[in-house]
Amino acid sequence: MTSTVVTNIRTLVTNDPACGEGGPLGLVEDAAVVLDGDRVAWVGPAADAPAADSAYDADGRAVLPGFVDSHSHLLFGGDRTAEFNARMSGRPYTAGGIRTTVAATREASDEELGRNLARFLDEARRQGTTTMETKSGYGLTPEQESRALRVAAEHTDEVTYMGAHIVAPEYADDPAAYVDLVTGPMLDACAPHARWVDVFCEKGAFDGDQARAVLAAGQAKGLTPRIHANQLSHGPGVQLAVELGAASADHCTHLSDTDVDALAHADATVATLLPGCEFSTRAVYPDARRLLDAGATVALSTDCNPGSSFTSSMPFCVAIAVREMGMTPDEAVWSATAGGARALRRDDVGRLSPGARADLTLLDAPSHVHLAYRPGVPLAARVWHRGVPVHG
């Protein structure tokens, strides 16, 4: 393996308090990072950096861990431009929403799904994202869901089975039979290709009992639960997530004090907030400040999908979280990196300290604060993934 020292870093975010100052961010000023193959070998002051086979001059700019996007829906065909345009123009729109995407996805070939997924992953990587979870959920038959997961597994190791996105159109009059399908033959076909199981626990999708059945069946097959919880209204999703030890409860927009307390005292469940969704639907933003002050672990993610949040930009979500959700710039950056890693139960990403995967984002700015300070500006000047430059 060859080693590289990235030196002359103005501000280095390690997300390891043992490595630097500034609390959880573990900041090192005038810093360097040594990459050895696909791992971080050393971090510290540039003046103390050990020799390496090659050097890269950061030219006084900031470096932080690659973003960890722990919630997306990238396996789909078509788009929903007409729906978005109508919503933003105040016009009624009665097309099928998720069902529109289901129909287009079923018609798409494996090659089309793979090309779309690769394009979105590359788009995200150019903005600094180096780890990205994605879900099925737009096929809703055993054959369609399993092929989506097979395609996903060719591109990312964070793959989620979400046959329980909505009730499939063919089962509109018999949702119980669809739950049986999701927890039976569909799960059997999909479990070998996934790490996670997810369910949309919401009015109009799956109620608490149905969601429990889906997640329990997935757990029995070795999949770890995560859940779409409390997005559109208050419901049982957050409580169910904590009870089952889900890795994350995602959305968390409508929370009771009991929900906040449960997340604050959960040993395993991260509250993943998805501000791109509220931005794109003109909905009320989740209250990150309330969760953080209570002691909950918070992650930020894009929820990139064709209907309610068609963005792959983690910097955009960081800026929204600071402007609209009560987070400080430091908290938002931590949540978009280390928080996402927690939501995926990963300790090799979301940090830059010895032993971590060599996933780095170099900003065209002296500080990570510029991610919120300069919203909409493409600040990712160079990105390393597994020690290899993939952008810039």
Image (cartoon, rainbow, N blue to C red):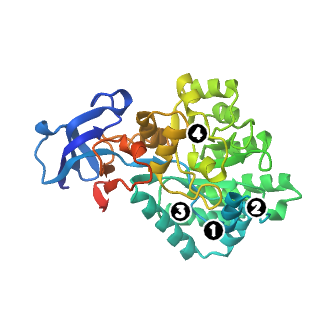
Amino acid type at mark 3 = Ala
Number of numbered callouts drawn? 4
Place residue 81 in its image quadrant.
Answer: bottom right
Q: Earlier in the sequence, mark 4 or mark 3?
A: 3
Q: Are marks 1 and 2 in contact (CB under 8 Å)?
A: no
Amino acid type at mark 2 = Arg
Q: Residues within 10 Å of mark 2 (few under 14, many from 20)?
A: few
- Give percent across and percent down for residue 188: 67, 57
Q: Residues within 10 Å of mark 4 (few under 14, many from 20)?
A: many
Q: CA distance from mark 4 to mark 3?
A: 20 Å
Amino acid type at mark 4 = Ser
Name the mark nearer the viewer: 3 or 2: 2
- Give percent across and percent down for residue 339: 47, 38
Instruction: Name the quadrant of the N terminus.
Output: bottom left
Amino acid type at mark 1 = Asp
| Residue at image coords 33%, 50% | 361
Kindly identify which residue carries mark 1: 79
Q: CA distance from mark 3 to mark 1?
A: 19 Å
Name the mark nearer the viewer: 1 or 4: 1
Kindly identify which residue carries mark 4: 248
Secondary element at tag 4: strand
Name the mark nearer the viewer: 4 or 3: 4
Q: From the viewer's perspective, is residue 234 above or below residue 21?
A: below
Kindly identify which residue carries mark 3: 152
Q: Earlier in the sequence, mark 1 or mark 2?
A: 1
Secondary element at tag 2: loop
Kindly identify which residue carries mark 2: 91
Q: CA distance from mark 1 to mark 4?
A: 27 Å
Q: Are marks 1 and 4 in contact (CB under 8 Å)?
A: no
